[in-house]
Image (cartoon, rainbow, N blue to C red):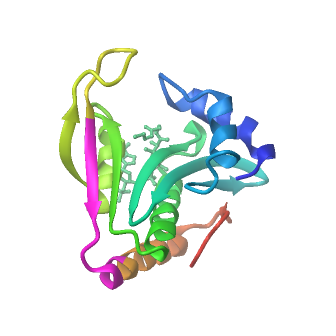
């Protein structure tokens, strides 16, 4: 993700979250925080249709965002982004990855559970707009090779099904 991408990413952020990040937060991630922050985008037809971010510090990762433009949901873009962001972590031998998710966000919880994230704790009334709890989910990678194979297999399955040429930057496959 580059400076030029921020506006498009921000528009998806506004469409996707009740308490969206400010534009300046994205700017900070790719400038001041660029040593720890990794952001990828998905593009179709030269338009950004999704993005995901992860902090990587030592052997720990924390997923900061993932969103797909509403017009492009449920066609595996979110999963492609998720696989790619996990692969960046795995390439750096990260062993644990955490994230937080609204307890009502079953769609995201399903996606995370598919990749073996499991709930470890609850942050009560974490979200300021409605006082909703956040579920903290964690992935512990015990068998790196097996997990890599799973990511690659799932990526290939999605690619086989896909007819649209979606481009995801920072692909490490
Ligand atoms: C969460 C999000 C990124 C998923 O992206 P997507 O491209 O629509 O999802 P995909 O088509 O790649 O689906 C991947 C998995 O997500 C889950 N999922 C996606 N849509 C779902 C739905 N409508 N109902 C239930 N589960 C769903 C499933 O586990 C699915 O895997 P499956 O197809 O094998 O069942 C997208 O819904 C989004 O941008 N939501 C708003 C932002 C958000 O909530 N981000 C998460 C913050 S914690």
Q: Quadrant of the C terminus?
A: bottom right
Using residue 14 as the reference point, say whether residue 44 is left or right of it: right
Q: Nearer the viewer, residue 65 or 25?
A: 25
**Res. 140 in view:** yes
Q: Position of residue 133 (x, y in %)?
A: 25, 27
Q: Residue at x 48, y 70 (%)?
A: 87
Relative to 170, does residue 103 appear above or below in the rendering?
above
Q: Nearer the viewer, residue 35 or 96?
A: 35
Q: Residue at x 36, y 47 (%)?
A: 99
Q: Position of residue 159 (x, y in %)?
A: 54, 72
Q: Residue at x 67, y 63 (%)?
A: 169
| Residue segment shown in magenta | 135-147
10 magenta-colored: no
**Res. 157 in view:** no
Query: Could you say which quadrant of the image residue 121 lies in?
Result: top left
Number of disc labels: 0
Q: Position of residue 134 (x, y in %)?
A: 28, 32
Q: Residue at x 64, y 53 (%)?
A: 34
138 magenta-colored: yes
Q: Position of residue 164 (x, y in %)?
A: 65, 63
Using residue 50 as the reference point, say whether residue 116 is left or right of it: left
Query: Could you say which quadrant of the image residue 117 lies in?
Result: bottom left
Relative to 28, does residue 152 appear above or below in the rendering?
below
């Amino acid at each position: 993700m580059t400076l030029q991408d921020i506006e498009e990413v921000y528009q998806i952020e506004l469409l996707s979250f009740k308490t969206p990040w400010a534009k300046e937060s994205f700017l900070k991630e790719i400038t001041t925080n660029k040593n720890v922050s990794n952001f990828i985008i998905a593009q179709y037809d030269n338009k950004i249709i999704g993005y995901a971010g992860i902090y990587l510090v030592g052997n720990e990762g924390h997923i900061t965002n993932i969103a797909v433009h509403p017009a492009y949901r449920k066609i595996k873009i979110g999963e492609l982004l998720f696989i790619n962001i996990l692969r960046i972590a795995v390439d750096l031998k990260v062993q644990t990855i955490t994230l937080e998710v609204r307890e009502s966000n079953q769609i995201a919880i399903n996606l995370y559970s598919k990749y073996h994230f499991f709930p470890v704790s609850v942050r009560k009334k974490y979200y300021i707009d409605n006082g909703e709890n956040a579920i903290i989910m964690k992935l512990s990678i015990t068998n790196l090779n097996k997990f890599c194979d799973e990511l690659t297999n799932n990526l290939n399955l999605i690619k086989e099904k896909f007819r649209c040429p979606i481009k995801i930057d920072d692909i490490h496959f």
